[in-house]
Amino acid sequence: MKLRGKVALVTGSGRGLGRAYALKLASVGADVVINDINLDSARQFQEELTAPTVMEEIRAQGVRSLGIQADVTKKDQVDAMVERIVRELGRIDILVNNAGGMLTPFERGFASTMPEEDVRFIFDVNLLGTIFCCQAVAPHMKAQRSGKIINVSSQAGVQGNDTGAIAHYCVAKAGVAEYTRLLAGELGPYNVTVNAIAPGVIVTSRAQVQFKRGVDPDLTAAEERRIPLRRLGVPEDCARVVEFLATDLSDYVTGQVICVCGGMVLSPS
């Protein structure tokens, strides 16, 4: 129970990858705050829980949990969320900035034509939300001279493509990677590590519903051919790396962007 007594905040953890990160941190002893813009979001994509809510799933592991519905693109809501965590749970040790995603129509995402409203929305939810959350926890981590910040970039932010597709998402996730490096440099003297993971093709409940990932055999086969390990990722693949970055196993690791992609980063776009 490496994280016993630690308090973690996982944004966008009402379902999918965020929920997997929250459950993993709870399994090694952390008290976990579940944040989402909709705490009941698992129902939207028919994701099955083992309890009525994610918070109850966390508590079933013998640790504390809060559920806070807040929009990470609103700085005042983020600041209020972190203050509540410190007030009610006593501290904040771990932040996983998971909220985000490619949440606009694919066909509108090409570099030369993407509309302004899509660009601003994707930047807000992926990059600005990450920045706001990091800024909110930084004073507390600096004061206690310890902390682990784990941002979520994407394979799309590490490796380009030759079509110009999902350009706003790629740029936002590349921004997360660079912000991670900059913040790591600033917070290093306070014994706060800042790293990022860059997931590749992961089968989540949303990906199954929206993109038929892992459902359509032809699509699955085509995606697997691009991956040296020849399989799609599952949330647990990413959650294990989050566990590493949240525990003392990674105490001398900071400013890194770790690709969790089955080797996809080695392949041409």
Image (cartoon, rainbow, N blue to C red):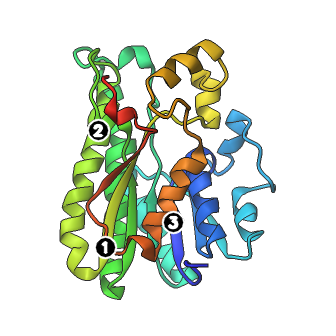
Report the number of numbered marks. Answer: 3
- Distance between the alpha carbons at the discs numbered 2 and 1: 23 Å
| Callout in the foreground (2, 3) | 2
| Callout in the foreground (1, 3) | 1
One can see residue 224 in this view:
yes
Report helix, strand or loop for mark 1: loop
Position of 175 relative to 107 (above/below): below
Residue at image coords 29%, 22%: 161
Residue 129 falls left or right of residue 160: right
Is the C-beta separation of discs 2 and 1 under 8 Å? Answer: no
Question: Local crowd at mark 2 within 10 Å, few (<14), some, or many (≥20)?
Answer: many
Q: Amino acid at mark 3?
A: Leu
Depth check, front residue: 264 or 67: 264
Residue at image coords 46%, 60%: 96
Residue at image coords 29%, 26%: 167
Residue 199 falls left or right of residue 207: left
Q: Which residue is identified by label 3?
A: 9
Q: Amino acid at mark 1?
A: Tyr
Q: Which mark is residue 252?
A: 1
Q: Image quadrant of residue 67?
A: bottom right
* Labels 2 and 1: the sequence-earlier one: 2
Quarter of the figure with the N terminus: bottom right
Q: Which residue is identified by label 2?
A: 158
Q: Amino acid at mark 2?
A: Val
Report helix, strand or loop for mark 3: strand
Position of 146 relative to 241 (above/below): below
